[in-house]
Image (cartoon, grey):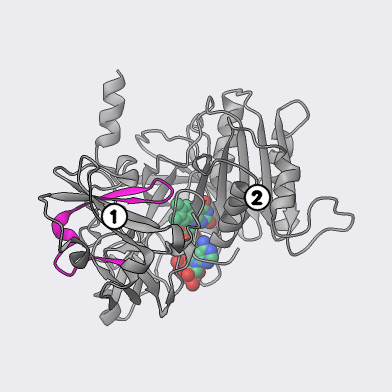
Amino acid sequence: MAGAAVLGRLGPLRWRLAEVVEVVPETPSAATIVLDVPDWPGHRAGQHADVRLTAEDGYQAQRSYSIASAPEDPRLALTVERLENGEVSPFLVDELRAGDRIELRGPIGGYFVWEANGGPLRLLAGGSGVVPLMAMLRHREATRSEAPATLLYSARSLGEVLYRDELERLGAAGAGLRVSYTLTRERPPGWSGYDRRIDGDMLGEVFGPVDPAATAFVCGPTSFVEAAADALVALGHDPARVKTERFGPTGG
Amino acid sequence: MDYVTRGFRGRRREPDESARVPPGQYLTDDFPVLSAGPTPHRPVAEWSFAVVAQDGEQLARWSWDEFRALPSETVTVDIHCVTKWSKLDTTWEGVSVDTLLSDVEAEAGYVTAFCDGGYTTNLPLEDVTGGKAWVAFGYDGEPLEPEHGGPARLLVPHLYFWKSAKWVRGLRLMDEDEPGFWEELGYHLYGDPWREQRYWGD
Ligand SMILES: Cc1cc2nc3c(=O)[nH]c(=O)nc-3n(C[C@H](O)[C@H](O)[C@H](O)COP(=O)(O)OP(=O)(O)OC[C@H]3O[C@@H](n4cnc5c(N)ncnc54)[C@H](O)[C@@H]3O)c2cc1C
């Protein structure tokens, strides 16, 4: 019943005790945490969840993490990048292991989302900003959506690129997904991709002419999001079809 | 307690600081940015601020120069973003909303702030009057940067910071509390950080 779904969304977002099924290292500084969440209400690609950790003496810390897994996946996956000296991310990446439990609530955010019938996708990722965009690409694959998709992924080095093998597989010929990388700090010998911070020329080359039906999703550190969103608007994209999500203050 | 996280210690704060940090928040020295889309870059020559009635009738309007000629105040406040960061002792310069509403003859229970880029947010009138809210044009002694809401943003520091609408262009007086942009998308209608009113139902 449609009404029930709406009521479900109106209910309080309660904390659920999730069990860690697996912690999968992605890069030297990032890991994917696969969770079993009891009665997870489901999510849409692009949404995030809040995580709450509690110390023995009752001290608590909360942070937000984008959901990396497709809505179709029975298990919830978060991918966390370790920030040196961070309070929460080093714990999640280095300490957490299968069998541990953490509190989680969500899904949160109804704007930075893409549905499989939501039209062509233009994705711009800066660093770990690829996480919610990956949920969209996984959702696209799980639903066999034919919406054309292009991902431009900016990372410091190839070693910091998340989901590289999976992106290669998803971007195989005929799948309707194109993936371009730009590596801003370090390039392997013979690198043929981009080697600079994103700019209007790069976006024009990667995405081609403006498609009024397409939606652009931009996610990453603030400096990346500002530059990417400004460049898209300068290229003629409708600002209302440029959706942004920012992970943190600075850096990246 | 089964929700204790094995091995998690966390980072404690000095007690005098923690008294100023609402539940679930952490302190940052940076100034993070939250917004749903591209940053509008509105030249001040094309900027104005209006107070309008619920039916759209314009009750007051200031050009940038007129607005800047109004008496302004410098305030130092703590701010709290729903994405979990809090920042203490931020210094702003702005025009009190009391000043902007002082000549407006109308009754209203609520206001909806409207902005460049289409963003809106709803607030009870009593939360933007009585010295609790400003239309800020300066931050830390400098003009407010576009990415932080310049040329001017609402500043309502006692509520979560999404209520401090960036790129604000005016206030619409409302009889009833109508959810704005984030409030329609699952965020709390009121947003008191001390009661941790982040999402619907909190
Ligand atoms: C909607 C949303 C979705 C997010 N999704 C993800 C995700 O999928 N994966 C992920 O790894 N993170 C994500 N984040 C960021 C995450 O919530 C934490 O901010 C991050 O893990 C750092 O927490 P920490 O406790 O380790 O660091 P803290 O102890 O909070 O901070 C340590 C230092 O790093 C700075 N800092 C904090 N965050 C960042 C940042 N993002 N970039 C640069 N410097 C920073 C702080 O100012 C401080 O100086 C998301 C944030 C939001 C708001």
Amino acid type of the residue that numbered disc 2 sits on in the rendered structure: Leu
Q: Which residue was labeled with disc 2?
A: A162
Secondary structure category for the residue under label 2: loop
Secondary structure category for the residue under label 1: strand
Residue B93 place in picture, x, y as percent: 33, 75
Q: Residue furthest right?
A: A190
Which image quarter holds the C terminus of chain A? bottom right
Q: Is residue A36 above or below residue B100?
A: above
Could you tell me if residue A151 is visible in this image? yes
> Residue A32 shows which numbered tag?
none
Splitting the image into 4 quarters, where does residue A63 fall?
bottom left
| Residue B176 in magenta stretch | no
Amino acid type of the residue that numbered disc 1 sits on in the rendered structure: Ala
> Subunit of mark 1?
B
Image check: B171 left or right of A130? Answer: left
Image check: A171 left or right of B88? Answer: right
Residue B146 place in picture, x, y as percent: 48, 63
Which of the pair A55/A187 is nearer the observer? A187
Q: Which residue was labeled with disc 1?
A: B50
